[in-house]
Amino acid sequence: MENLQTKAINTWCPGCGNFGILAAFKKAMETYDKKDIVIVSDIGCSSKIIDYLNLSSFDSLHGRSISTASGIKLGNPNLKVIVFIGDGGALNEGISHLIHLAKRNSDITVLMHDNRLFALTTGQFTAASPKGMKTRSTPEGVIESPLNPLELMLDSNATFIARSYSSKIDHLASIIKKAIDHEGFSFVEILQPCISFLDNSKTYNEKVYEAEDKQRSKEEARKLIEEWNYNGEGNIPLGVFYSENKDSYEKLMNKGITKNNIYIEKCLQAHL
Ligand SMILES: Cc1ncc(C[n+]2csc(CCOP(=O)(O)OP(=O)(O)O)c2C)c(N)n1
Ligand code: SF4
């Protein structure tokens, strides 16, 4: 873990859930060779994490990190490519990339730090914000219902869908590892209190529980995913909700390239 330390000064607010995510990620990294890993950040408090990890990294634009990661994976399919992104980046600015890369089953891992608002810009509402929440951009309270990101991922055909919590470091580390080892698109929602603008740690501490670790059909996964409506009601299950084995986009793409090369070779031979 010391190996992953950098000299950057940490600027997160004391008590921020991002510290738990950093600790869990370092723990998850213990079994990997550093040269096989590339981390990609979006823009936000969550994205500062790449400054605190001594790994190959790419600092992308707001909402564009998921497509950047896909490009890296296509360029070198041997790499394990991991994205750190906030709920604003994933569900607002970058939502189309999230849907398309899940649909495509690109072999990348998306770790969504879900603090349920735009934190770096001092707390505006996102698609994940609870109804009624007063923010700087919604002084009278949010009038829309929040999006369920896991349901969105299930409907977009993501092949690995999980949720964990920044205060459960061992649980989070094991989920991150499973997500990285999964071949295909893996999405992990990490519930994360934002101490400065939305400290929901008391609710999470009371309501989260670890769901049974088992294989589920899409219908069973949907039932579990819908157990919590993101608006204060229901207990909050954690764990891997859905996983499926399916060829990744890069695998299919590389098969196509190999086939094409053989085809080109044959054409050349015929011509000569
Ligand atoms: C295209 C674009 N829109 C808006 C911004 C301004 N901006 C920078 S950080 C940020 C908030 C990020 O929020 P989120 O993705 O939820 O991450 P968090 O800070 O909560 O971890 C915003 C809106 C930007 N940099 N680029
Ligand atoms: S503003 Fe919120 S998310 Fe950002 S560092 Fe502070 S506590 Fe963490």
Image: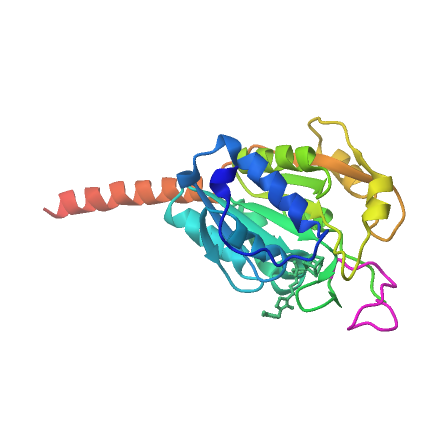
Q: Is residue 251 left or right of residue 233?
A: left
Residue farthest to the left, as pictured: 272
Q: Where on the picture, by quarter, is residue 269?
A: top left
Residue 192 belongs to magenta span: no
Residue displayed at 74% across by 56% down: 194
Q: Position of residue 257 (x, y in %)?
A: 33, 45
User: x, y (%) of residue 115?
Assistant: 73, 55
Q: Position of residue 145 (x, y in %)?
A: 83, 60
131 in magenta = yes
Residues rendered magenta in the picture: 127-142
Q: How is the image coloured?
A: rainbow
Q: Is residue 192 above or below residue 121?
A: above
Q: Position of residue 226 (x, y in %)?
A: 81, 44
Which of the 4 image quarters holds residue 164?
A: top right
Could you say which is closer to the camera, residue 67 or residue 23? 23
Query: Horizontally, is 269 left or right of 37 in the view?
Result: left
Q: Residue at x 74, y 66 (%)?
A: 123
Q: Is residue 188 in view from this perspective?
A: no
Magenta highlight: main SS: loop
Ligand number 1: quarter of image: bottom right
Q: Quadrant of residue 130?
A: bottom right
Q: Nearer the viewer, residue 64 or 217?
A: 64
Is residue 140 in sight in this rendering?
yes
In this rendering, the answer to whether 23 lies above or below 135 is above
- Closer to the camera, 197 or 219? 197
Please tell me how many numbered marks the rendered image carries. 0
Q: Where 200 falls versus 142 (above or below)?
A: above
